[in-house]
Image: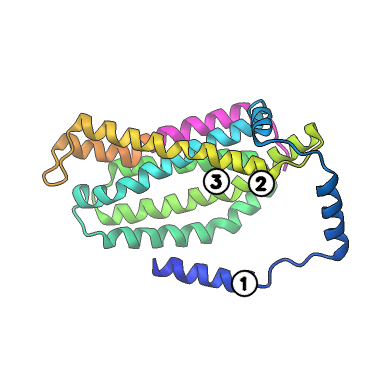
Amino acid sequence: AFISFIILGISLVVFIPGSKETGEIKERFILGYETAEKKSFFWTMKMAIKQKNFMLALLTYIFFMIALGLMSTNTVNFVDDVLKRGQIVRMYGSVFMLITSTATMPIWIRIARKIGHSHTYSIGLLLFGFSLLLYSFVSNIIQYYIVNSLSGMSVAMFTIMLSPVLADCYDEIAVKTKKHLESTLIGIRNLFVRISVIIQSLIVAIVHIITVFDPINPSKEALLGLRLLQGFFPFLFCIIAALIFYKWFDLKGT
């Protein structure tokens, strides 16, 4: 929390001045806004659902959030019952993840310029899935920190391409409809992404019921369930999403 507070505080100072626009740009926006044909949220949603590339990007984002949510929410029990360590381990793991993700971002940006947004996006999601799978085999904190570091690298490769890929989808829709609907499309994206919370909660509940998870005295089956939630199931969602996206997403430009 303290580290997050520092990062957000620095960001606040940087963005206080805001982005200043010229009077000409403001006038053009006002004129365009007043004369533009208004479309309802549901009209835009119906149209967006028919856009293949947008729905592929949205589906993979939902799968990513399910994987990330499973790993994140399960970490408390994983550290307590599998590693048998205090929760301070989670903080150190998050620090390793933050450091490696920040350090590797420039590398992924340079790679994206060479191979394109969509390929970098697919590879990042694929690598993130394999890094999560390693959690299933972790047995001590050293291994846990190593996997945290690898996850930080791979998740950075995916997340820095999320906005460019979605922007490509928004541009494609703008070209087809002759309308800029970015704000509504972002709302639609956020609405559907909430589905990931429901799905990950159901998966956790089902696994705990099947393995009869008892936080006071977890059985071998329950510990196996924690490993599956921490690594295997997130891996499946990432791999399936990466393969689907790579196969059918056709905005392959840079």
Mark number for residue 224? none
Q: Earlier in the sequence, mark 3 or mark 2?
A: 3
Viewer can see residue 117: no
Residue at left offset 26%, top offset 59%: 87
Res 47 → quadrant: top right
Residue 236: in magenta span = yes
Mark number for residue 164? 2
Between disc 1 and disc 3, the foreground one is 1
* Whether residue 9 is situated above or below residue 125 in the rendered picture: below
Say few, some or many: other residues with alpha carbon within 10 Å of mark 3 (under 14 / 14 to 19 / 20 or more). many
User: Farthest residue in the left direction?
Assistant: 217
Read off the residue under disc 1.
14
Q: Earlier in the sequence, mark 1 or mark 3?
A: 1
Q: Earlier in the sequence, mark 1 or mark 2?
A: 1
The answer to whether marks 1 and 3 mark residues whose Cβ atoms lie closer than 8 Å is: no
Q: Amino acid at mark 2?
A: Pro
Gap in Å between the C-alphas at discs 3 and 2? 11 Å
Measured from the top left, where is residue 169 in percent x and y? 69, 38
Give the residues in magenta: 234-254
Read off the residue under disc 3.
158
